[in-house]
Image (cartoon, helix red, strand yellow):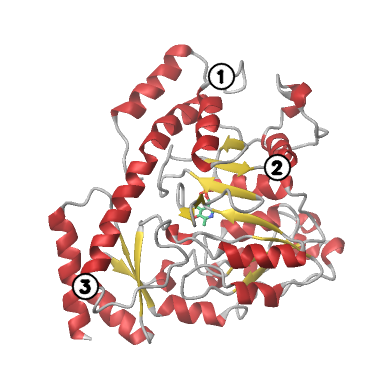
Amino acid sequence: MFRIGQEEIDAVARVINSKQLFRVNKGNQEADNFEKELREKIGVDYALLMSGGTGALIAALVGLGVGPGDEVIVPAYTFMASASAVLAVGAIPVLADIDESMTIDPASVEEKITDKTKVIIPVHICGFPANMDALKEIAAKHNLFILEDACQADGGSYKGKRLGSIGDAGAFSFNVFKIITAGEGGAVVTNNRKVYERALIYHDGGAAFRPYTGELQEPVFMGTQMRVSDITGAIMREQIKRLDGILTDLRAVKKKIMDALKDVARFIPSNDIEGDCGTTLGFNFDSEELARKFSAEVEGSWIPFDSGKHVYINWDPIIEKRGGHCDAVNPYMMAENALLNKEGANADACPKSLDILKRTVYVSLHCDWTEEQINERIDSCKKAFAKL
Ligand SMILES: *Cc1c(COP(=O)(O)O)cnc(C)c1O
């Protein structure tokens, strides 16, 4: 969360005063309007607001027709939800290494592809755009879908296109740790009507009985409940107005610090620094020892290996193959998955990623830092580099 205030309070009051808290009553409500604004912002034909980013990933995979018998390639460094979403639809996650950009390494992706692979999930982690050109080339060559996990990259871009609009589908999160937020929330975006309709049906267990049911081209199947109330829609309409301002200011802070440190620092390489969200500044070191020495000197800095839940070796339910609440729905136990690569998320799957995560240092940035706060970071980084 970066900016929130009176506008969001007024928006919530508006919904409560309207007494229309359910979003699917009559159309043209807050959530519908947010979806329209999100479509325009991201540059896609379809957008679906829902209860979270994990749900958005799951609904997008359902939209793409992924299920038992399919392998999905996921980076070893991401929030666990990128991989758990794959299990939620009955498929098997196979991990690929990251490269020094901290995003999925296209060369590693190619190594993990089998004749069972159906989707690649690049994650724009910490707002760093993944190498979409290389991934699109691989996906085209092997006839795979790309689902962008843009949960940490709301509004970011790659070569002039907004993240989430480049692959076959994209997922955003609006939980409280993300760039824009309603406390919880998420969205699927796509240009593919079938993917959108299937995600819509899946996310609304009442899809058989809605005002929109008659317009569906896809047959209604049984889904679940990932809808939001119209309060979420109202908050997100205010948040999306703030999005580009937040990104502009984050990028300006990042650029100022990078310019000041360019002679002493080795920044993590970027696949597109213009499109980078600017939430996180990263430095690369030759060894873990140097990274730890540097990090100890810089207040507010941290080593991504230490973040725990984003590092695959800590994803216990996945490592231990507890992929569902009982054996019959655990993808690791399903007959359809018997011949798949079920060892693709073992603890020893991606040692190269662990090495990179240990010798990288992050500084989290804020769009509302004063000149003085920015200079403090610059000075403290300069001193820490001088001490190495
Ligand atoms: C936050 C996050 C998610 C999940 O989002 P929720 O809204 O918490 O469900 C998925 N992937 C990544 C990379 C995330 O950071």
Relative to 200, does residue 145 appear above or below in the rendering?
A: below
Q: Amino acid at mark 3?
A: Cys
Q: Are marks 2 and 3 in contact (CB under 8 Å)?
A: no
Q: Are marks 2 and 1 in contact (CB under 8 Å)?
A: no
Query: What x and y, as percent, mark residue 79?
Result: 52, 60
Residues packed near mark 3 inside 10 Å, few (<14), some (14 to 19) or many (20 plus): many
* Residue hosting label 3: 381
Q: Quadrant of residue 8?
A: top left
Q: Quadrant of residue 63?
A: top right
What residue lies at 59% left-to-right and 55% top-to-bottom? 148
Which of the numbered marks, if any, corresponds to residue 192? 2
Which of the numbered marks, if any, corresponds to residue 28? 1
What residue lies at 40% left-to-right and 55% top-to-bottom? 277
Query: What x and y, as percent, mark residue 133?
Result: 59, 64
Q: Which secondary structure lies at badge 3? A: helix
Q: Which sits in the foreground, 257 or 92?
A: 257
Which of the numbered marks, if any, corresponds to residue 82? none
Q: Which secondary structure lies at badge 1? A: loop
Relative to 357, does residue 63 appear above or below in the rendering?
A: above
**Image quarter (top left, top right, bottom left or bottom right) of the C terminus:** bottom left
Query: What x and y, as percent, mark residue 35?
Result: 55, 32
Relative to 192, does residue 274 appear above or below in the rendering?
A: below
Residue 249 is left or right of residue 383, and the answer is right
Looking at marks 3 and 1 on the same chain, the residue that comes earlier in the sequence is marked by 1
Q: Amino acid at mark 1?
A: Asn
Q: Nearer the viewer, mark 2 or mark 1?
A: 2
3D distance between C-alphas at marks 2 and 1:
22 Å
Residue 93 in sight in this render: no
Q: Amino acid at mark 2?
A: Asn
Q: Nearer the viewer, mark 2 or mark 3?
A: 2
What residue lies at 49% left-to-right and 64% top-to-bottom? 310
